[in-house]
Amino acid sequence: MKFVVQKMATVSLLSSSLFLSKPTSLPSLFLRLPLKRCVSSSIQFRHRYGVLLSATSASAVATESTETPTVAHNDNVEQTQKTSETEKVVLPTNDSSEKLLRIRHTCAHVMAMAVQKLYPDAKVTIGPWIENGFYYDFDMDPLTDKDLKRIKKEMDRIIGRNLPLVREEVSRDEAERRIMAINEPYKMEILDSIKEDPITIYHIGDEWWDLCAGPHVKTTGNINKKAVELESVAGAYWRGDEKKPMLQRIYGTAWENEEQLKAYIHFKEEAKRRDHRRLGQDLDLFSIQDEAGGGLVFWHPKGSIVRHIIEDFWKTTHIEHGYDLLYTPHVAKADLWKISGHLDFYRENMYDQMDIEDELYQLRPMNCPYHILVYQRKLQSYRDFPIRVAELGTVYRYELSGSLHGLFRVRGFTQDDAHIFCLEDQIKDEIRAVLDLTEEILLKFGFNKYEVNLSTRPEKAVGGDDIWEKATSALQDALDDKGWSYQIDEGGGAFYGPKIDLKIEDALGRKWQCSTIQVDFNLPERFDMTYIDSNSEKKRPIMIHRAVLGSLERFFGVLIEHYAGDFPLWLSPIQARVLPVTDTQLDYCNEVMKKLKTNGIRAEICHGERLPKLIRNAEKQKIPLMAVVGAKEVDTQTVTVRSRFGGELGTMKVNDFIIRIKSATESRTSM
């Protein structure tokens, strides 16, 4: 049975702001990739006592999966059929189904009970429900996949016993006495963090209990054991502190029924098939070399071609929209980062300083101060505004090794950064222009579904009420003019100004934070930025940070997974592969390839194998077009064309082949 998922709700993702941004790891509406890796997540959950905690409360250390996805190479037609011949299964979310939330929370407790039955020395910590299921952290010896099977069997037994979930209120002293009696030090630490009284405890029958405020199902029998699966185990530091003990985190998924679990597994497998790390290796696009260090990306020739296409389109489009392009240094004196405030607020994400001729220098984590220095090279007039500058600037951020994840979280990445300096009455028009530019660029890459959020002033902020109100209204008016629906995140803005965040939706319905637009009242003040107004007086300009793609590395990873490596013709690193039936046609094939390349078409020749294998290899490498050449084609000076997306296109003159490729490339369609 095959399934298609209909979305019922959206999921909040980690912001990727320009001031405090990080590439996020695999955000997903329904999917958590079954990797034996725990990656920092933006998921939030209500702790058992109502305190909003982040799922990153235990930060992660990677233990690479030994699993290799056993997925056949993509056949586009087969995959289309696989997702069209379906029975629709609506997957609920924790927000849309209280029943599901109760099931998942109870499953976490059942799993903890099962673990402690099988491993009596294991100590429990916290066990929240999360986006697609639940997890629990244990202080115990490392676990394996074989251990997970044992734990799942014990969970099934507990579920089958139909044990009641019983809520009990106790005094703080009584809770402390009970915790000491069973020697659970982590529970004691959790108890100390709970401020409310009385303390609530949930029991599973009379055999196991934990500090908890619920909610839970009435009995374990309310859980469908065939709709529960343990997925992976990862290492995680207690309280996210690498100086504290390393715990074993077990991830599980739970659903209301077996059909939902099957649908979830189907989409999880599809996500594995699209995993950019595997495809990056299979298609020879990029690598991360251990000899150089984690989180540092090597773009291979084919990946570099795609990057060149992205960059060239990005630059051309920005110039057309009135931006001036910049190139700025990768390092600067540490004093620059003191002025900007990064050394005060962002030091933990910055690399150590370098001593150069008795002066301290710093690798840049952001591009903003550089653009300000360019602005300040001369006295600006109100007549010069708006001033728009843009740069594909590489930045460096310190990330723990356990949080690194392919192209999605790296230590060095190129941000498509731009800054607009304008007057107060220009904010709305500039924001609207950025929205138009964002839409234009994202549409070219095949993204036309967005989730938009407008974040307003937080409790602690710089700048007066008047300028905050004007800036927020300008952002809201620009969105209204654009006609985009959006949600308001009250108090979710940065301390330095309100912002718009845009998440793109990929082919699997997953949301990815890419574009952001942020008004900044902080840096103009810190750098004492000024301009001369119409009365010859010095005034402070408005500064707008903005990025469309966010990070080229991360965006490339999203593109790989969105297209499953099957890039459209205009983006494909190799657009056409020339295939001789025998090596006797090689001379003519070289003529064809030379003509293709002369016309700007990315082409290559492959030979030395029988034609069926050459075609299969081209399919595996996801080459959009194959030009087959046999004796007949040599005689008639033609090629026989096969398209991955259109099938057999017939025999045609080389010039006609070139014209059709150019037309499809310019229109960004397939042949």
Image (cartoon, helix red, strand yellow):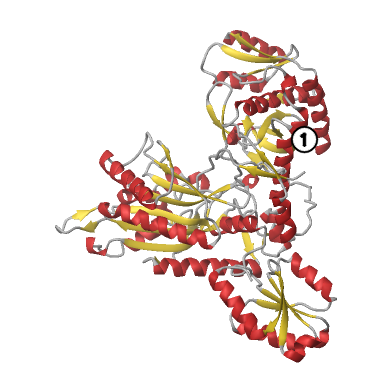
User: Circle 1 sits on which residue?
Assistant: 142
Q: Secondary structure at mark 1?
A: loop
Q: Is residue 146 above or below residue 561?
A: above
Q: Residue at x 73, y 55 (%)?
A: 81
Counting the numbered discs, the total is 1
Furthest toward the left, the residue is 535
Residue 410 is left or right of residue 518, and the answer is: right
Residue 294 is left or right of residue 228, and the answer is: left
Q: Nearer the viewer, residue 204 or 144?
A: 204
Furthest toward the right, the residue is 610
Q: Residue at x 17, y 56 (%)?
A: 537
At which x and y percent is residue 518? 39, 49
Q: Quadrant of residue 218?
A: top right
Q: Is residue 220 above or below residue 521?
A: above
Q: Is residue 121 visible?
A: no
Give the amino acid type for the residue marked by disc 1 in the picture: Pro
Q: Is residue 43 visible?
A: yes
At which x and y percent is residue 268? 70, 45
Q: Nearer the viewer, residue 97 or 287?
A: 97
At which x and y percent is residue 174? 62, 8
Q: Quadrant of the C terminus?
A: bottom right
Q: Nearer the viewer, residue 612 or 515?
A: 612
Q: Nearer the viewer, residue 540 or 25?
A: 25
Q: Residue at x 80, y 73 (%)?
A: 614
Q: Quadrant of residue 181?
A: top right
Question: Badge 1: how crowded within 10 Å, few (<14), some, or many (20+)?
Answer: some
Q: Quadrant of the N terminus?
A: top right
Residue 146 is left or right of residue 18, and the answer is: right
Q: Is residue 289 above or below residue 105?
A: below
At which x and y percent is residue 574? 66, 72
